[in-house]
């Protein structure tokens, strides 16, 4: 899967935003590598492709920039299924299969090969609880994926989503700062995006795959 | 096998916001205390600025007790149960929920202590809503003032005083009850956004003020000042600038040598002796069952657990639950109607990414009885509050004000523009107790240990609904005055599990309608004290904890002064 922005385009953008000089080398390195497709660990190859197709429609890549696919929202979900999201594992397996079956039923083709407009109209059916074949129903599955896609796009990159800080850049969140000045809390003066994750900070012990919590 | 431990003077159940306070006056006077706490110690390195973990995953690194015994809610005895919440945001750790609370530290308004008599005096006797069981508290604001004062200094609360011995200062809350001296430190600083809101409030004739907060605005007791980093909302403080009991009263009590803290101890029952006096508690730790005998038992497990443990501790002397021979345990349940806020959308960025929920602008003009209710058909009101507190997941999950769908390119374009242009106002509303709003044990649903969870039977009544509508309208005006281009009234929603839950073991002079006496000790079990908002008879219109803590200190001090009578 091609990365949304080429390496050169990234560099150009970074330079235009005055970032090349301001960003520390470590952060810059995170901007640069070509994005390769994430290795999925808990979803099957077929499941992961359907999930990527869904997240691509929920937060699309468009003229306003990269979306949930590039942010790795599907990867976030896949990784979470092994721990904090494990209670949703069956819901994903059965929901993704149900979506594909629904696509076949309506169009004769699988979800991933459909045109964007066709995919959108099927997802609308799910959202409005009109699609059949889901357990318990299609809106429940749709809301689950939407919630996790947003989490995967806007949570700390440590969880496998929000890659290259795509989500934070999308909404203008300037990154983790442990000390915030008076100036950084004004409305006419916005802090620079610093591309720092909570888990870059050595003082914190973080076990992101802790099993006890859940978010279902 | 059950292990019977040597006895102690006092055993406390829970070392959170309330229990963590009571241990200090006790141990300082030489009383031996065993503090049983279901959770563990947490430390600064546990408190990463991580929104997902703090706000959406229920603190996976803490002991998962509150999350595994979330109360089940139904509106009334006829209605079906709501789908059960999957998490409950109270913390199980030494320090309890004060580790990750917002630390807004208010005194209750004097009116809230005397709702019945004050309402009768001002409007005549028939203004208390039908079915309400509200009573005047057995103490007044003036009785509690010395304890508020003590706590503000002991913990470290920053703020502007609005009323020192009757001298009004408009930098603070001009409606507050008189205090004897200023706060020990100034409030958290203002920001461009909070100033914008305060300016608008002034144009409307209001007197805006910053919230008092148990957060260091400057170095205090050798702990540093807040750095406004933006993860205070359900986040622990990596600097120990947030004055939880885990960094204030508990270590100070430990230093006396008279406090023994036993962590990861889950209390399952309070025992009684042949005379019906509390004799100690039973708890589970590491798969073993222990009995900790004590002269006095202090119950401080938060509102739902306080009622639940009493009901689970039945015996021959108390067949329907400890201290429940008058059928009052679980009664007079209230919340804060915390939902039912208002959202405002602005035509420019607000830059609310860094800050904290205690940094903001509030007004009290429509709270309590601060305005004349003669022409309104409700009593009480709400404290209004807007704060400098946003994070990426919260912001991107914003309400779209009917201007965009929930997903897709249009949604993306909308949040790219608006994620930092909206704010939610908190309206903490008076909630009254009613005959049919109560807590009991669920008949079938249990926690993983097999004990029934708490069941909430409660719904908002007309008074709450009317005052919600009224205050939402006023909040919308405030937002519009500040330049909002759109507003949205959040639904009040069902009266489900709450972080501001009150009642269940109400304090009052009459044992027929109250579980504890004016000092916080059970009417039926004289050596059982109860700490927490479960003893409060009115909700007030502001955050509960400083009141809970003032009451806890007062109960502990009463015990110290009356040790022989109570402990025998
Ligand atoms: C996100 C959030 C924000 C908040 N913000 C504010 C605010 O800004 N201002 C304010 O005034 N209030 C706020 N509150 C409410 C505040 O946290 C509570 O009022 C306060 O913590 C109550 O103190 P407590 O001791 O009753 O309960 P807790 O602080 O929850 O402590 C109870 C303790 O008892 C322990 N425990 C429970 N059951 C047992 C048992 N069976 N055996 C052993 N131990 C047990 C628990 O593990 C816990 O440590 C907030 C709450 C939340 C969740
Ligand atoms: S905002 Fe301040 S008090 Fe809150 S956690 Fe951050 S530094 Fe600590």
Image (cartoon, rainbow, N blue to C red):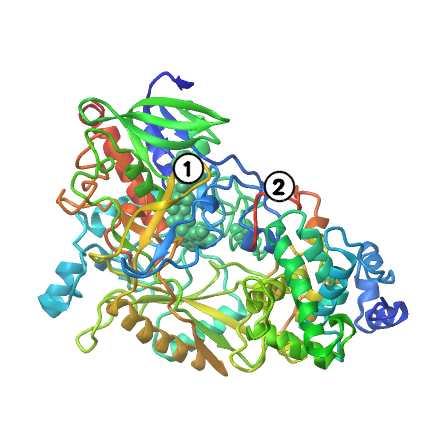
Task: Identify the residue at image location x=34%, y=46%.
Answer: B442
Task: Name the subunit of mark 1.
Answer: B
Q: Nearer the viewer, residue B568 or B303?
A: B303
Q: Is residue A179 visible?
A: no
Would residue B178 appear left or right of B304 to someone viewing this image?
A: left
Q: Quadrant of residue B186?
A: bottom left
Q: Which residue is mark 1?
A: B450
Identify which residue is drawn at 41% across, 18% down. B3
Asked if the residues shown at circle 1 and circle 2 are in contact, with their CB atoms under 8 angstroms apart, the answer is no
Q: Answer with the quarter of the image where residue A46 lies.
A: bottom right
Look at the numbered disc 1 and give the secondary structure of its residue: loop
Please give the residue where the numbered disc 2 appears in the rendered image. Answer: B45
Residue B233 x %, y %: 51, 55
The quarter of the rendered structure image containing the C terminus of chain B is top left
Residue B481 placement (x, y as % from top left): 43, 81
Task: Please provide percent x and percent y for residue A154.
Answer: 66, 63
User: Left or right: B494 with respect to A80?
Assistant: left
Residue A104 appearing in the image: yes
């Amino acid at each position: 899967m091609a990365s949304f922005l080429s390496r050169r385009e990234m560099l150009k953008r970074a330079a235009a935003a005055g970032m090349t000089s301001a960003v520390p080398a470590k952060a810059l390195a995170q901007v640069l590598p070509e994005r390769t497709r994430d290795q999925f660990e808990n979803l099957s190859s077929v499941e992961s492709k359907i999930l990527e197709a869904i997240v691509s429609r929920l937060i699309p890549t468009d003229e306003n920039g990269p979306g949930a696919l590039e942010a790795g929202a599907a990867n976030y979900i896949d990784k979470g299924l092994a721990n904090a999201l494990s209670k949703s594992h069956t819901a994903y397996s059965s929901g993704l299969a149900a979506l594909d079956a629904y696509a076949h039923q309506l169009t004769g083709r699988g979800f991933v090969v459909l045109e964007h407009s066709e995919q959108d109209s099927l997802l609308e059916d799910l959202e409005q609880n009109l699609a059949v074949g889901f357990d318990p129903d299609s809106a429940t599955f749709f809301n689950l994926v939407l919630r996790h896609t947003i989490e995967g796009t806007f949570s700390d990159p440590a969880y496998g989503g929000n890659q290259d800080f795509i989500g934070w850049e999308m909404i203008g969140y300037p990154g983790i700062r442990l000390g915030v000045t008076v100036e950084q809390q004004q409305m006419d003066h916005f802090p620079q995006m610093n591309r720092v994750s909570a888990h870059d900070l050595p003082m914190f012990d973080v076990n992101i795959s802790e099993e006890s919590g859940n978010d279902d | 096998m059950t292990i019977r431990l040597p006895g102690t003077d006092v055993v406390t159940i829970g070392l959170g916001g309330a229990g963590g306070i009571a241990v200090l006056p006790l141990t300082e006077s030489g009383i031996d205390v065993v503090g049983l706490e279901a959770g563990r110690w947490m430390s600064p390195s546990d408190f990463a600025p991580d929104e997902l973990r703090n706000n959406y995953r229920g603190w996976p690194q803490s002991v998962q007790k509150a999350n595994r015994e979330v109360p089940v809610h139904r509106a009334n005895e006829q209605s079906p149960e709501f789908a059960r919440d999957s998490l409950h945001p109270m913390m199980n750790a030494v320090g309890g929920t004060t580790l990750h609370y917002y630390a807004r530290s208010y005194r209750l308004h004097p009116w809230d202590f005397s709702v019945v008599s004050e309402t009768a005096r001002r409007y005549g006797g028939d203004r208390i809503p039908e079915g309400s069981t509200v009573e005047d508290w057995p103490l007044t604001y003036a009785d509690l003032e010395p304890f508020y004062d003590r706590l503000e200094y002991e913990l470290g609360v920053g703020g502007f005083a609005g009323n020192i011995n009757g001298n009004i200062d408009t930098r603070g809350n001009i409606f507050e009850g008189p205090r004897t001296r200023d706060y020990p430190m100034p409030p958290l600083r203002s920001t461009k956004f909070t100033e914008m809101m305060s300016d608008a409030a002034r144009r409307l004739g209001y007197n805006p003020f910053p919230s008092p907060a148990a957060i260091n605005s400057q170095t205090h007791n050798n702990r540093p000042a807040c750095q406004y980093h933006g993860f205070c909302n359900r986040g622990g403080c990596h600097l120990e600038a947030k004055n939880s009991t885990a960094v204030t009263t508990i270590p100070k009590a430990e230093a006396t040598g008279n406090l023994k803290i036993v962590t990861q101890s889950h209390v399952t029952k309070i025992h009684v002796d042949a005379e019906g006096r509390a004799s100690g508690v039973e708890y589970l730790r590491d798969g073993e069952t222990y009995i900790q005998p004590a002269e006095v038992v202090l119950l401080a497990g938060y509102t739902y657990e306080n009622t639940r443990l009493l009901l689970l501790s039945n015996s021959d002397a108390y067949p329907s639950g400890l201290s429940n021979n008058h059928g009052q345990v679980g009664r007079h349940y209230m919340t804060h109607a915390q939902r039912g806020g208002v959202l405002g959308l602005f035509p420019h960025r607000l830059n609310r990414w860094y800050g904290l929920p205690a940094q903001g602008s509030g007004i009290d003009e429509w709270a309590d009885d601060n305005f004349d209710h003669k022409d309104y058909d409700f009593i009480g009101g709400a404290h209004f509050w807007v704060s400098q507190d946003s994070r990426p997941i919260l912001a991107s999950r914003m309400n779209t004000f009917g201007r965009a769908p929930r997903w897709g390119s249009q949604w993306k374009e909308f949040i790219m523009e608006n994620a930092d242009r909206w704010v939610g106002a908190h309206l903490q509303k008076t909630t009254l107790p009613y005959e049919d709003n109560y807590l009991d044990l669920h008949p079938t649903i249990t926690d993983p240990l097999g004990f029934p969870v708490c069941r909430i039977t409660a719904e908002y009544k007309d008074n709450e609904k009317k005052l919600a509508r009224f205050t939402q309208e006023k909040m919308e005006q405030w937002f519009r005055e500040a330049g909002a281009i759109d507003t949205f009234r959040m639904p009040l929603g069902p009266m489900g599990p709450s972080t501001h839950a009150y009642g269940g073991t109400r304090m009052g002079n009459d044992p027929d309608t109250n579980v504890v006496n004016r000092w916080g000790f059970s009417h039926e079990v004289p050596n059982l004290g109860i700490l927490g908002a479960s003893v409060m008879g009115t909700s007030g219109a502001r955050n509960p904890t400083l009141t809970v803590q003032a009451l806890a200190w007062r109960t502990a001090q009463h015990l110290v002064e009356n040790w022989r009578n109570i402990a025998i």
